[in-house]
Image (cartoon, grey):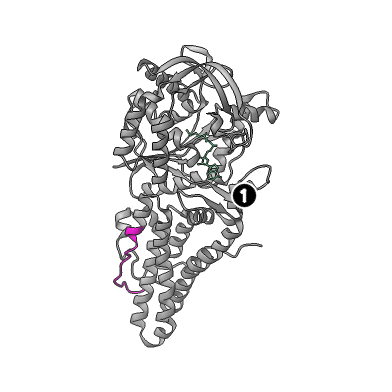
Amino acid sequence: MKKFYLTTPIYYVNDAPHIGHAYATILADVLARYHRLKGDEVFFLTGTDENSQKNTEAAEKNGYTDIRAYLDMMSVKWRESFRALDITFDRFIRTTEDEHKSAVNKFWSAVEANGDIYEGVYEGLYCNGCEMFKTETDLVGGNCPLHKTPPKHLKEKNYFFKLSSYREKLLAHIDANPEFIMPEGRRNEVRSYVDKFMEDVSISRETMKWGIPVPGHPGSVVYVWFDALINYLSGVGYGSDEKKFARLWPADLHLVGKDIIKFHCALWPAMLMSAGLPLPTRVFATGFFTVNGDKMSKSLGNVIDPVKLAGRFGNDALRFFLLREIPVGGDGDFSTTRLAERYSSDLANEFGNLLHRVLSMAEKYFDGKVPLAAEGSVPQWAAYEKGLETLDFAMALDAIWEILRDSNKMIDTEKPWVLAKSDTDKLGKLLYLLLERLRHAGWMLLPIMPASAKKLFAQLGIPDEDRRPYEEAKAWGGLIEGGILQKGEPLFPRLNP
Ligand code: ME8
């Protein structure tokens, strides 16, 4: 059995999840479900990044004197939000867990033993929002361009990681493994950073009180990024369950936003090289999106709560829309009006209506039963699979919608209501073809819109269809002649205004 270990970023808990966080997590969920369908041993890790100054500041701002209590409350909120969004994570990690702390200890010691940690003084600028050191050239008008706030001046004794001594090895790895960093534009960005700008990095904080103590030097805590990246190891048993770790590591895919690509494609692989561990196979950077053309921000009041949105349109419609509308890897724009439009055009009309029309005809002409089996094929499988293997979600959706649109067209041109009077044999074959194509579309939709795909199967009279082995399901002829169809409620009912 092939294993597939994939991760999302772990999220800061200084606020509730918004649609951007849901986006990264939903993409990962689609892939996790797809690989499970194919029979792979999937491990899907997500969670919360809790040892950040942003979190402790948020705790204080919200009147918490007990930071731990704030983190507990927020972490539950994130986990429950992901559950509400139907995210099938296998583990929700928290960086305040003991298991993670001991993994960080083990990792730090391995890097130290390799001679890659030294003591020095850091003096410079630091942006709390990014949890990152800044140089003057990074700033716009004296502010961090992302957070629009001035960085703080810091001077403290820190431990440094010899990142720059991994420059050549990193470049060689990036060049030899074109799929390590995707999409390609990001690879070039990281390559040039590693080549020209990458310096040693401070990996401890003397002034911060919340965090994982540096092993052997309890006056300092581990820099939050050094700590957070290790979640990808501790999440699968590094330092606690070596058997599990050996089975699952290295990760097959880290899905991350484009804002954190350098941490994942420069610092992280160098850390792993230093600790003597294999590198993840692939890091894929997704783009950022705006909301109706604006950056999402609290001050603009346009932060979108994904759970509320899913409550209105349904999880499946939200998942579909994010995959359909935002070019993966590129930047995009989110608009609830567009979501409502796509709901009516692509989902209610092209998909829901097709099912309804086909089942109504089967009811009328064949007593609600699957007619005589007929020959056919679904050539769209190849494009669908290629789309999901390469994270080209638009390609996968195009393949599915080609089946649906072509079926709608077929009804219009073949005119079953005319055939009903002239050629019932041809009519039966046509209906079989349409029903069987819907079954295939349902399979392709299972990872993307799981609840709708299950409803579709139930209406086709095969409620346990998703238990069937994937390769068998892909073959033509899964619907059996005489099977009892169960026309039900519309898959995508009219939206309340
Ligand atoms: O960076 N559009 O956590 P974070 C699309 N804790 N995606 C967005 C988005 C937007 N407008 N806003 C956020 C951190 N994201 C660290 C990660 S990993 C070891 C540590 C997504 O809470 C995007 O995927 O700031 C981004 O990388 C992630 O949320 C960052 O979440």
Other residues around mark 1 within 10 Å, as few (<14) / some (14–19) / many (≥20): few
Spot occupied by residue 411 in the image (x, y as percentages of width and height): 43, 77
Spot occupied by residue 177 in the image (x, y as percentages of width and height): 31, 39
Predominant SS along the magenta part: loop
Q: Is mark 1 within 8 Å of ligand 1?
A: no
Q: Does residue 6 sit above or below 353 in this rendering?
A: above
- Boundaries of the magenta span: 371-383
Q: Does residue 157 sit above or below 334 in this rendering?
A: above
Residue name at image x 39 percent, y 61 percent: 399
Quarter location, residue 380: bottom left
The magenta stretch spans residue 381:
yes
Q: Residue furthest bottom?
A: 422
Quarter location, residue 477: bottom left
Q: Is residue 367 visible?
A: no
How many numbered circles does the render carry? 1
Along the horizontal axis of the image, is 217 left or right of 479? right
Residue name at image x 36 percent, y 77 percent: 428
Q: Foreground: 243 or 57?
A: 57
Along the horizontal axis of the image, is 211 left or right of 275? right
Three-letter amino acid code at the position of disc 1: Asp
Q: Foreground: 195 or 474?
A: 195
The magenta stretch spans residue 226:
no
Spot occupied by residue 312 in the image (x, y as percentages of width and height): 61, 55
Q: Which residue lies under the disc numbered 1?
A: 294
Q: Is residue 398 visible?
A: yes
Spot occupied by residue 53 in the image (x, y as percentages of width and height): 59, 26
Quarter location, residue 278: top left
Q: Foreground: 198 or 395?
A: 198
Q: Residue furthest right?
A: 63
Quadrant of the rendering where the N terminus is positioned: top left
Q: Does residue 208 sit above or below 187 in this rendering?
A: above
Quadrant of the rendering where the C terminus is positioned: bottom right
